[in-house]
Image (cartoon, rainbow, N blue to C red):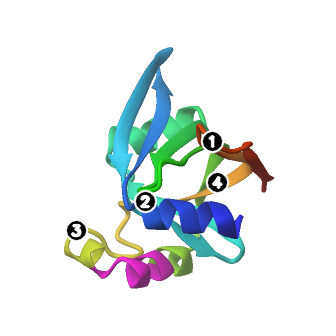
Amino acid sequence: MNEVYEFLKAAGTYYLATVENGEPRVRPFGTIDVWNGRLTLQTGLKKDVAKQMLANPRVEICAMSADGRWIRVTADAVLVEDVDAAEHMMNAYPSLRAMYAPGDGNTAVFALENGRAVIASFTAEPVVFTF
């Protein structure tokens, strides 16, 4: 899982895919953290993306590195109902504090569980991780 975290962190922006009414929804994301041994991301509960993950937790993430490798992560996004997880995320991304606060009723941290990640390129065999 650390390799997955490091890849996504270094990429800076990754694309998160969810499903809404049977249709795919993809948007850029930038928060990635490890909290209590779990890979986590952050969003607002008022946003459609949070509603989509709560309705159907299966998500996919895709990102590309500067060296031409890419990663695809498939996992279940599970809401973490612990203010400490949000505080940890805010510490990792202090700029979020302008919009969010742990325990504000909107800040949401989702853990990626039952995950599988593949790091691939055009020149090397894929590397697979499960978490």
Labels 1, 4: front one:
1
Mark 1 and mark 3: span between their CA atoms?
41 Å
Q: Residues within 10 Å of mark 4 (few under 14, many from 20)?
A: many
Labels 1, 3: front one:
1
Q: Quadrant of the C terminus?
A: bottom right
Disc assigned to residue 99: 3
- Check the image and report above or below for 17 versus 84: above
Disc assigned to residue 112: 4
Magenta extent = 87-94
Indicate the quadrant where residue 124 lies: top right
Mark 4 and mark 2: span between their CA atoms?
18 Å
Tag 1 residue: 123
Labels 1, 2: front one:
1
Q: Please give the name of the residue rendered at 77% of the width and 48% of the height, measured from the top-left corner.
A: 128
Mark 4 and mark 3: span between their CA atoms?
23 Å
| Spot occupied by residue 49 in the image (x, y as percentages of width and height) | 40, 40
**Tag 4 and tag 2, C-beta contact below 8 Å:** no
Q: Amino acid at mark 3?
A: Met
Mark 1 or 2, nearer chain start: 2
The reply to whether residue 67 is in sight is yes
Mark 4 or 3, nearer chain start: 3
Q: Main secondary structure of the magenta part?
A: helix
| Spot occupied by residue 18 in the image (x, y as percentages of width and height) | 49, 32
In terms of secondary structure, where does tag 4 sit? Answer: strand
Tag 2 residue: 11
